[in-house]
Image (cartoon, rainbow, N blue to C red):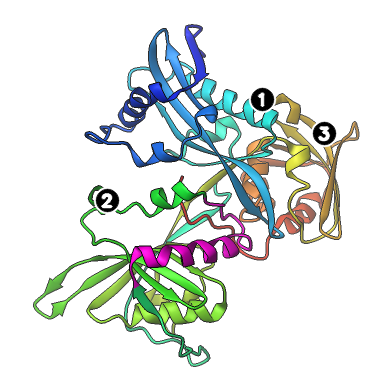
């Protein structure tokens, strides 16, 4: 239950030191000594809120204006929720609920039909309507020197290690072209690059500075964990980002990493459909651990669903439950023809009932509605409609977001 003494407002620059302190403390951390936390650099103050108990700041949260690539290569406006925290001693009093409601109602007013976030804990955000596993992440580890299967051809393209200053203009251009084609990728503003590839000593966790290697159609950024034993160097390559415009660039850059001298292994948080598993001749040596990545929240059902493209025609009535954004609740006729959807209010009987979090999980095509039915998250009233909707919502590739925000 919300505490009636709580209030919320957007912050100003004078609030930033306390905002930073509360956010750090909420994660059992300390603000940087004599400096600014890197996430503070990208805040949009008119979309950044603090919750107060009287005069004491007890909660933080922000929304970043981004474009999210959704199925069909459509660039959708999205609110990227970040720096959400509640000061120790003030939890379970409605602070997070007040933040979430304020953010979602604000996005409804400003026109962001989709909200996205990375969850610090998996039990928090479904109750605010966010769907889990809207995109997933694969932690992949593999040894170097692995050969490709005979059908994979490596080109003679030159791959160069360069300085950060030399790499950045090229990487910005390549990333902007690629992110428009990959479901789940986000637009980047200038300061986002400094956060995403922050290279201060405190960001390295004992690893090397970033190495930047450029291919004519892509690039890779990685750190090195220096290790050795009696048999010689056993360095590990920790890949931060591998971005390619062509399938050939994927092959060439992976071959480059696998063949680096003095390295024994590679680790990489990557897409669940990363092609490397099917490129090497012994895929069993590629170890993968799956985790959730983006959580997605439908802010406006009638605006979000028509944005993306669909794989098959369908005509169903969806009954949506949404206690936090009541304008979404009710029955919607969802009709898809030739990939494009029309969504309208209706009084017709529901074919399928689900809550808004389930709709968020399936929106990018990474979760099957049929699986959520088996998990008792979806109720089918008219036989065959869940299967038809499942096929319509599928994407041609697995959604993937390569950056935390």
Q: x, y (%) of residue 369?
A: 68, 50
Q: Residues within 10 Å of mark 1 (few under 14, many from 20)?
A: some
- Residue at left offset 63%, top offset 54%: 69
Name the residue carrying label 1: 323
Q: x, y (%) of residue 168?
A: 43, 62
Q: SS for tag 1?
A: loop
Q: x, y (%) of residue 392?
A: 76, 57
Q: Going by the image, does 114 lie left or right of 389?
A: left
Is 171 one of the magenta-colored residues? yes
- Residue at left offset 48%, top offset 33%: 124
Is 70 one of the magenta-colored residues? no
- Tell me how far mark 2 sits from mark 3, CA to CA: 51 Å
Name the residue carrying label 2: 200
When asked about the image quadrant of residue 46, the answer is top right
Label located before the other in sequence (2 or 1)? 2
Label located before the other in sequence (3 or 1)? 1
Q: SS for tag 3?
A: strand
In magenta, the rendered stretch is 162-188
- Tell me how far mark 3 sits from mark 1, CA to CA: 14 Å
Q: Does 363 sit above or below residue 229?
A: above
Q: x, y (%) of residue 10?
A: 51, 22
Q: SS for tag 2?
A: loop
Depth check, front residue: 345 or 243: 243
When asked about the image quadrant of residue 148, the answer is bottom left
Name the residue carrying label 3: 331
Residue mark closest to the camera, 2 vs 1: 2
- Tell me how far mark 2 sits from mark 1, CA to CA: 43 Å
- Residue at left offset 22%, top offset 79%: 262
Label located before the other in sequence (2 or 3)? 2
């Amino acid at each position: 239950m919300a505490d009636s003494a709580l209030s919320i407002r957007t912050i100003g620059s004078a609030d930033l030191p306390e905002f930073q302190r509360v956010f750090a403390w909420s994660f059992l951390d300390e603000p940087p000594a004599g400096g600014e936390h890197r996430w503070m650099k990208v805040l949009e103050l008119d979309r950044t809120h603090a919750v107060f108990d009287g005069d004491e700041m007890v909660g933080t949260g922000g929304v970043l204006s981004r474009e999210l690539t959704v199925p069909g290569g459509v660039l959708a406006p999205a609110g990227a929720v970040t720096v959400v925290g509640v000061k120790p001693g003030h939890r379970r009093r409605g602070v997070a609920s007040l933040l979430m409601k304020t953010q979602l109602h604000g996005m409804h007013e400003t026109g962001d039909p989709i909200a996205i976030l990375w969850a610090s804990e998996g039990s928090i955000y479904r109750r605010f309507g966010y769907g889990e596993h809207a995109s997933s992440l694969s932690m992949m580890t593999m040894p170097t020197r692995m050969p490709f299967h005979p059908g994979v051809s490596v080109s003679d393209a030159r791959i160069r290690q360069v300085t950060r200053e030399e790499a950045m203009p090229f990487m910005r251009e390549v990333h902007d072209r690629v992110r428009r084609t990959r479901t789940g990728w986000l637009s980047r503003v200038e300061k986002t690059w400094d956060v995403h590839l922050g290279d201060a000593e405190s960001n390295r966790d004992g690893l090397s500075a970033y190495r930047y290697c450029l291919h004519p159609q892509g690039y890779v950024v990685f750190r090195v964990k220096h290790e050795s034993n009696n048999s010689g160097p056993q360095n590990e390559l920790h890949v931060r980002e591998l971005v390619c415009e062509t399938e050939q660039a994927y092959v060439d850059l992976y071959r480059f990493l696998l063949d680096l001298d003095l390295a024994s292994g590679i680790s990489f948080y990557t897409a669940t459909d990363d092609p490397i598993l099917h490129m090497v001749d012994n895929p069993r040596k590629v170890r993968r651990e799956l985790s959730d990545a983006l959580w997605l929240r439908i802010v406006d059902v009638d605006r979000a669903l028509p944005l993306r493209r669909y794989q098959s025609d369908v005509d169903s009535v969806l009954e949506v439950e949404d206690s936090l954004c009541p304008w979404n609740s009710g029955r919607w006729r969802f009709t898809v023809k030739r990939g494009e959807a029309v969504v309208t209010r209706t009084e017709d009987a529901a074919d399928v009932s689900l809550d808004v979090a389930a709709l968020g999980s399936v929106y990018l095509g990474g979760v099957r509605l049929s699986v959520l039915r088996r998990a008792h998250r979806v109720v089918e009233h008219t036989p065959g409609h869940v299967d038809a909707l499942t096929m319509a919502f599928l994407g041609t590739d697995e959604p993937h977001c390569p950056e935390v925000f």
